[in-house]
Image (spheres, rainbow, N blue to C red):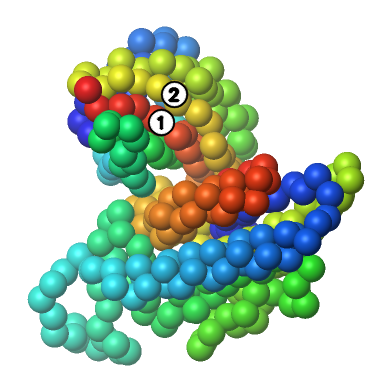
Amino acid sequence: MQELFTAVYSKFTADSTLFNSVDGRMYNTEAEKGLQDDYIVFSLPSGVPEYWFNDEQVDDIIIQFNIFSIKNADTDIQTIFTNLKNVYNNTTLTVSGYTFFKMELIFYQLTRPPLENTYQYTVQYLVQMEKN
Amino acid sequence: MTVKKRVVWKPQKLDPLTNSLQEGLVAIGMQMSGDIKKSMSRSRTDRDKPRSKKKNEKGPITYASAVGQPPKPIESRLMNSISVNWTGSSKARGTTEGKGDISDGVGKPDGGKIKNGKKFKVVVGTNVQYAPYLEFGTRYIKPRPFMRPGFELHKKAIERKLAKFGKKGLVKI
């Protein structure tokens, strides 16, 4: 799924509003340690291949973004969440080797895990694409 | 805080098929709950080899679950709390097992009303406070999804069941 990760990250770097709101800090699966500013981690918690007519393989993939903010107010994280939605909601990704169908927002949740002093937005998208 | 998957069925009107469909959806919910528990009990840990206890370490030796896999039960509270509930059930909380506290069971969904009928919802989930932190991860905890993979496994079965009865439904997290 490296192709999908590349496509997701390319969208991020192409949008200056989202890119600048976290100063370019978006990480694949695991962030750098000790970060003190807002950042995003994206990962793939679930992927299910389906076989349609003539054994065409269509993948249903969940892409999850975790936005973290260590600020005492949720203002910044709300802005980043809005910027993220503006970039990824119903967007078209260019994924090498696949025909892209859709990227759809299916879940989001704002939490403040105890003991971590962090605001956290969990945002999940359903990506559907067919292997060429 | 609750992590749950919700199946919403919006009937146009009540008919003889209603009970059969509702029972079918509850049965899928039960199966989903069982599969989620199985996936947790079979989950691997970060380390395969056993380690010896550290000095002054009390209690059983534990290992972190492997990242990306369902959380391995230690005291089994989360696993035993995975439960099913549905609109009109007689329980305020879904049935938990073993060490699962009754308050850990998932709450009964409110059916609500729609034009010409009532909504029927089946909810599979847990009411354990730390469940979403394991499912989605936090700044310091990497995600160990257990609900989403179980849900994806049964999504098609739910859609087929609804289609068989010619009903429209909403399958969502």
The dot on residue A102 is 2
Find residue B9 and report its horizontal and vertical position in percent.
70, 50
Q: Residue furthest right?
A: B116
Where is A123 relative to B59, above or below?
Answer: above
Mark 2 or 1 closer to N-term? Answer: 2
Identified at 35% across, 21% down, the residue is A100
- Quadrant into which the N terminus of chain B falls: bottom right
Callouts 2 and 1 close, C-beta under 8 Å: yes
Q: Is residue B106 visible in the rendered structure shown here?
A: no
Pointer 1 chain: A
Residue drawn at the location 27% of the way across and 78% of the way down? B62
Dividing the picture into quadrants, the one containing residue B56 is bottom left
- Kind of residue indicated by mark 2: Lys
Q: Is residue A111 left or right of residue B149?
A: right
Left or right side of A98 for B144: right
Percent x, y of residue A1: 23, 34
Q: Residue at x 48, y 38 (%)?
A: A124
Q: Which residue is mark 1?
A: A127
